[in-house]
Amino acid sequence: MDRNVGSVLLGIVIGVVIASLYFVIWRLRYSAKIRENAVQRSLAVTAGKVHEQLVPYLPEFGFNPKDARFLGSPVDLVVFDGLADGQVRRVVFLEVKTGGAPLTARERQVRQIIEAREVAWAELRLTRASD
């Protein structure tokens, strides 16, 4: 009877060791895939940010690059169409997307406000304190 109990305990120990080894191997593979995925997403974001900066100099831009001002967030560019010629015709808020990237919730909200013409001009004049 004692021999059977020892055999059962030995079997349990061997099973736990094998299960632990499988878990460690699985975790190493899974962690590597997560890291690789994170690196790929980071590269895509970085490439998108570089593209946003360079887009005014691409042939398909459609505006004078001198009229564009980079914001980055919540829209990528504001184009003062005609500014370089001395006659601004319109102001264009431009979001640059690559591939099938959708607009974020904030970008959609800004688009809705602009399309609803809820855009205003404000001026802030600062006065200096007397010396």
Image: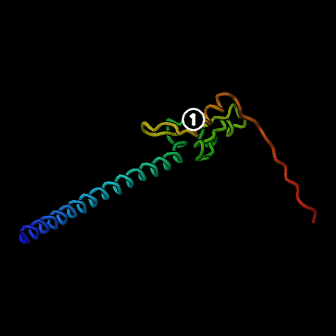
Vertical placement of 92 versus 52: above or below? Answer: above
| Residue located 84% across and 49% down the image | 125
When asked about the image quadrant of residue 63, the answer is: top right
Q: Which is more toward the observer, 32 or 74?
A: 32
Task: Point out residue 65 in the picture as x, y percentages from the top left corner.
Answer: 59, 42
Quarter of the image with the N terminus is: bottom left
Quarter of the image with the C terminus is: bottom right
Vertical placement of 18 versus 114: above or below? Answer: below
Task: Point out residue 74 in the picture as x, y percentages from the top left corner.
Answer: 60, 43
Residues packed near mark 1 inside 10 Å, few (<14), some (14 to 19) or many (20 plus): some
Type of the residue with mark 1:
Arg
- Image-based side of 4 in relation to 54, left or right: left
Task: Point out residue 27 in the picture as x, y percentages from the top left corner.
Answer: 28, 59
- Image-based side of 75 in relation to 41, left or right: right
Q: Which is more toward the observer, 16 or 4?
A: 4
- Image-based side of 118 in relation to 5, left or right: right
Vertical placement of 20 versus 82: above or below? Answer: below
Instruction: Give the image's coloring scheme.
Output: rainbow
The image shows a total of numbered marks equal to 1
Vertical placement of 129 versus 71: above or below? Answer: below
| Residue located 68% across and 32% down the image | 90
Circle 1 sits on which residue? 108
Residue lying farthest to the top in this orientation: 116
Residue lying farthest to the front in this orientation: 1
- Image-based side of 91 in relation to 26, left or right: right
Q: Which is more toward the observer, 109 or 8?
A: 8
Element type at mark 1: helix
Task: Point out residue 55 in the picture as x, y percentages from the top left corner.
Answer: 52, 43
When asked about the image quadrant of residue 84, the answer is: top right
When asked about the image quadrant of residue 23, the answer is: bottom left
